[in-house]
Image (cartoon, coloured by chain):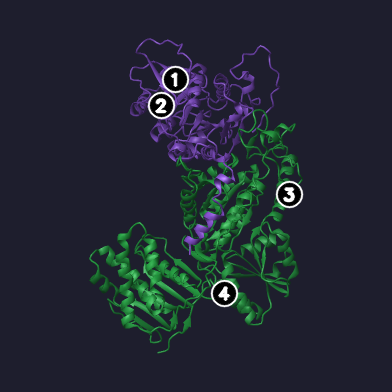
Amino acid sequence: MNKIESVNDFVIKFANVNGSGSASANQMFAKGVFRSGIPVSPKNIFPSNIQGLPTWFEVRVNEKGYLGRREGIDIFVAMNPQSYQKDVAELKQDGYLIYDSSWKRDFDRDDINILEIPLTKLCVQEFTNPKQRLLFKNLGYVGLLASILEMDKEIYISLIEEQFRGKEKLIEPNVKALNIGYNYAEENFKDYCDIKVSKSDKTDGLILTSGNDAAGLGCVYGGATVCAWYPITPSTSLAESYNKYSEKLRVEIGTEKNKFAFIQAEDELAAMGITIGANWNGARAFTATSGPGVSLMSEFIGLAYFAEVPTVLFNVQRGGPSTGMPTRTQQSDILCSAYASHGDTKHVLLIPSDPKECFDFAVEAFDLADRLQTPVIVLLDLDLGMNDWSTKEFEWDDSNDYDRGKVLSKEDLDGIEKFGRYLDVDGDGIPYRTYPGTHPEKGAYFTRGTSHDEYAGYTEDGVKNAEMLSRLLKKFQTASSLVPAPVFNQEKNNSSMGIIYFGSTDCSMQEALDMLEEQNMKIDAMRIRAFPFNLEVWEFIEDHDLLFIVEQNRDGQMRTLIMAEGGIIPDKLVSILCFDGQPITAEHITNKINTHLSGKPVLAAS
Amino acid sequence: MTYIVKPKNHHPLLEKNELGLTRRDYEGAVSTLCAGCGHDSISSAIVEACFQLSIESYKVAKLSGIGCSSKAPAYFLNQSHGFNSVHGRMPSIATGAAMANHELLYLGISGDGDSASIGIGQFVHCARRQLNMTYIVENNGTYGLTKGQFSATNDLESKNKYGDDNLFPSIDLPSMAIQLGASFVARSFSGDKEQLVPLLKAALSHKGFSFLDIISPCVTFNNHNTSTKSYDYIREHNDALSRPDFVPSGKEILTEYPRGSSIEVPLHDGSLLSLEKLSESYDPTDKIKAIQNIQESQRDGKVLTGLLYADPEAKDLREILNVSDKPLNKMDQKELCPGSERLQDINSGLK
């Protein structure tokens, strides 16, 4: 029997029953590899359900730092008989199947290596508590993996100790569970597996965290004091992260009172209303939601746009339309975010590509919202938001000041004869605002979603209203020079072809670009990080005859946005799409590009 | 929302309050509501209450949704910031605003369409969260701005202007508010300034969610003789629970009610709402009895007015969430940003 041979480069997949405690054990496996110095990208593939249905967890281990999903499984830990058939079919030839042989199975494949471990029997022997007997099977296979991959077992023991700090009683049985698998493998599978984890230093300067966790922390650092939200997968953990970090970092010493307000609203409409109300009154506030929530918030987003109230919204995208695939990833809210609400509206979008950038863009979102007095929507997706990524350490420059934008103080108002809330004093389309309660006689105005003049007075004068709408467009123009510039893969363009991509696609794109280079294909690449598009984006498009736009949606929404905003000829823009709810792979990207260049039609479906 | 600016001429002998301000200083733009609209009487009662309480206008935020009632904030307190938001969503705007700065006074103006239909969810949860604000529903039982459709507070079988029957029972907002945990609930009538002004003053002085349902007849669409929200109907069926008198903190109680017939509700700021009892069973601190009183009077075809329920000890949202005494919008970067050293600790924890 042949065996896959590899050091620090493989994909392992776990199949479990959801609600069985497997996710934290699988997470622990990934963290153990990370602590061994090799970048990992764990991805939780879970059903929209709490208990009893199949769930998977995929970990790519890659020393080069490729973190995108890769097709083909090298090691399969199959712990769910419900999905055996499908799971085993996914395993690569010469790969390794680990299963619970308390109930023996024949898998009908003679091209794979099967490692049998009677986990249930072993746990029943060792533990009396029925809950523990079930739960500890998970740590049992982590122990087995540590042994066959020749990892340092001590790493897992310290991870267990850290996890149960404060509940020391639980350390001993957990370590025992780990050893059940470890010892069994040492006795039965010594030198069996040719895939190894060998200690390295490729995680120096990296941390392992999710985009939601990072963005929640970014909101704390960005000075957000009000978070109003309504539970929805996959954004919930972003709001919860803000609360978790605020409880640690934002409690007044002495009074023990909170320097933040965390409000679970009755629905997304209220969550947005609370966010707008707080921003209107001079606090930095945000909400986090996903597609269906954005639909519900759209009326309010239009109000914030037209009344020019700073607002920060995180949209962690999931599979749509409608309720769609709530636990699968997509980038399919580009258009509904960019043009959210009725009437002529356009919104600033920030599109981070990894957790580090989620942190940075969360901070930046508040500065931009205050500076531009408009909604800023940060677009994550489920893969980036909920999965842990090996990402660069967070950084903070203590000399950075928040940009609170054009806000008039009492003294400022004293020096102004007549305050006009919507007067374009500086010619950049951005007016000055006042917070309620600033001045006894000056600066009060009426905020309204109805047509208004420069002094915030209601008007039905169509020409005046058209002037206001035009000024908002000027402001949007100003925004294009303030939002983060694109990132280029090359210092200087050196091809007539280019690739445009954004968001979580980045990790697979880096690998795809290396693959294309190996095929001697010259192609430039640009990662868009914001809307409105900066000058650099248009220059890149101008500079190339053919552009591939890689997106994780069906309709090529970014392509539509580029065509609509820049009047770009459609023929020049070729869509590379993936919308099956799984993160896009490098192979998918390169295959589609090659297919297009070979003259065959590129099918939209992945 | 149409408006006409009022000229700023004051008669030199106009009465002044403790801040040296006249009633004119509390006014807003000229109303563009229909002549005789109950909402205008409410606006003038708000002006009177704020004048008497010597409120600093610029420390008030007036908020509204959409509808005739929601236009009203333009017609009082010119020096206050106003927010005319979206239909039925004033409560969430108020919640956010109040979280940002609890030192201002939040006055929400809504209508029966705005609160009992499209915004009922927000009304419910705003009351439940005990937001420290005064929430007024200018209740006329009709959709005025869209020309006379029934609203959800209209009584079953009462007719509209065109003679159609209302087929559905009315929603009683005060009963709901009491049940939801509002800590100050009153009903009044736009035409009864003597009752309305003291109630408004007490509501504005109360800490917590103060709810006022003010029957405010719509002269254009719902003031005919088959309406239960008309001036005549309310005058005939008004069943006042008490005659209120508001006593500011530190002032003597001058009103003398016969012994045993008065009730006093002490408010958070030290002021007092003194009530002459008109009904034997009346006890504004008893939640269950308050709801019973409302339902009994409803059964008898009366409109119960006055202070229906008050809990002066109730906590408000900020206290419930344990939010700092310093307004969040006054905290600077130093107070809010944990800085680079803490971030290094967080990085270490994520390895």
Q: Which mark is residue A391?
A: none
Q: Which hue belongs to chain A?
A: green
Left or right: A447 as drawn, with respect to A60: right
Q: CA distance from mark 3 to mark 1?
A: 54 Å
The residue type indicated by label 4 comes to: Ala
A243 or A337: nearer the eye?
Answer: A243
The tag earlier along the polypeptide, 2 or 1, is 1
Q: Which residue is mark 3?
A: A474
Q: Reply above or below: B242 against A113.
A: above
Q: CA distance from mark 3 to mark 4?
A: 39 Å
Q: Which residue is mark 2?
A: B310
Q: Residues within 10 Å of mark 4 (few under 14, many from 20)?
A: many
Dots 2 and 1: beta carbons under 8 Å?
A: yes
Q: Which residue is mark 4?
A: A586
Q: Which image quarter is the N terminus of chain A in? A: bottom left
Residue A316 percent across, percent down from the top left:
53, 57
Residue A478 percent across, percent down from the top left:
72, 51
Q: Residue furthest bottom?
A: A1
A255 or B27: nearer the eye?
Answer: A255
Q: Reply above or below: B256 against A408.
A: above
Residue A540 appears in which quarter of the rendering? bottom right
Q: Residues within 10 Å of mark 1 (few under 14, many from 20)?
A: many
Q: Which mark is residue B273?
A: 1
A326 or B228: nearer the eye?
Answer: A326
Dots 4 and 2: beta carbons under 8 Å?
A: no
Residues at marks 4 and 2 on the same chain = no
The residue type indicated by label 2 comes to: Ala
Residue B149 percent across, percent down from the top left:
53, 34
Q: Which image quarter is the C terminus of chain A in? A: bottom right
Residues at marks 2 and 1 on the same chain = yes
